[in-house]
Amino acid sequence: MRTTLLERNTAVAKGPTTRELETRLDGMSEAIRLVQSRVDRMPTPDMVQSDVEKLREVTGTRIDALSTLLDSKLLGNEIALKAALLTRKEATEEIKENFGKQFENQAKLIEALKERIDRTEGRAGGLDKGWGIFVSAVGIIGIIATIIVTRT
């Protein structure tokens, strides 16, 4: 279809038709509906603030729980350290006490050995004197026997 210049100018002068206007209005209505649905899904400042408060509360609770856990672990470590130090102290005192007893026992044993040596030396000295007397007596008897044998 061929339109003449007059028809075209007349159409431009008339402006858009009703159908064109309805199509445009429908398009605008759809655009408004899409924008509104997007705006409805966007959080409001109050919603964001509420979420931030909830997050702050949860984070505070978790930090408090971790702090409590850390305190209890530190307290447990402190108690274990005190128990270990006390045990070490008791063991050291027991070792000192046992060492002192062993030292006393060794000193008593040394004294007993000294006494035995002294008694043994005393007996040995007595035996030495006894042997000396015995040998002297045998010598004297030998001399007497020699004198008697030579006289007879």
Image (cartoon, helix red, strand yellow):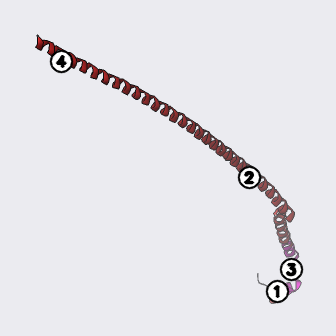
User: Reading the chain from its start, which is encountered first: label 4 or label 3?
Assistant: 3
- Mark 2 lies on residue: 67
User: Reading the chain from its start, which is encountered first: label 3 or label 2?
Assistant: 3
Q: State the image quarter where residue 100 is shown.
A: top right
Amino acid carrying mark 1 in the image: Arg
In the rendered image, residue 75, in percent from the top left (x then y), is placed at 70, 47
Is 133 situated left or right of 68 in this image? left
- Mark 4 lies on residue: 143
| Mark 3 and mark 2 residues within 8 Å of each other at the beta carbon | no
Measure how far apart labels 3 and 2 are at the Cα level: 73 Å
What is the magenta range? 10-24
Disc 3 element: loop
Disc 1 element: helix
Residue 108: within the magenta? no
Name the residue rendered at 26%, 19% in the picture. 134
Q: Residues within 10 Å of mark 4 (few under 14, many from 20)?
A: few
Q: Which mark is residue 16?
A: 3
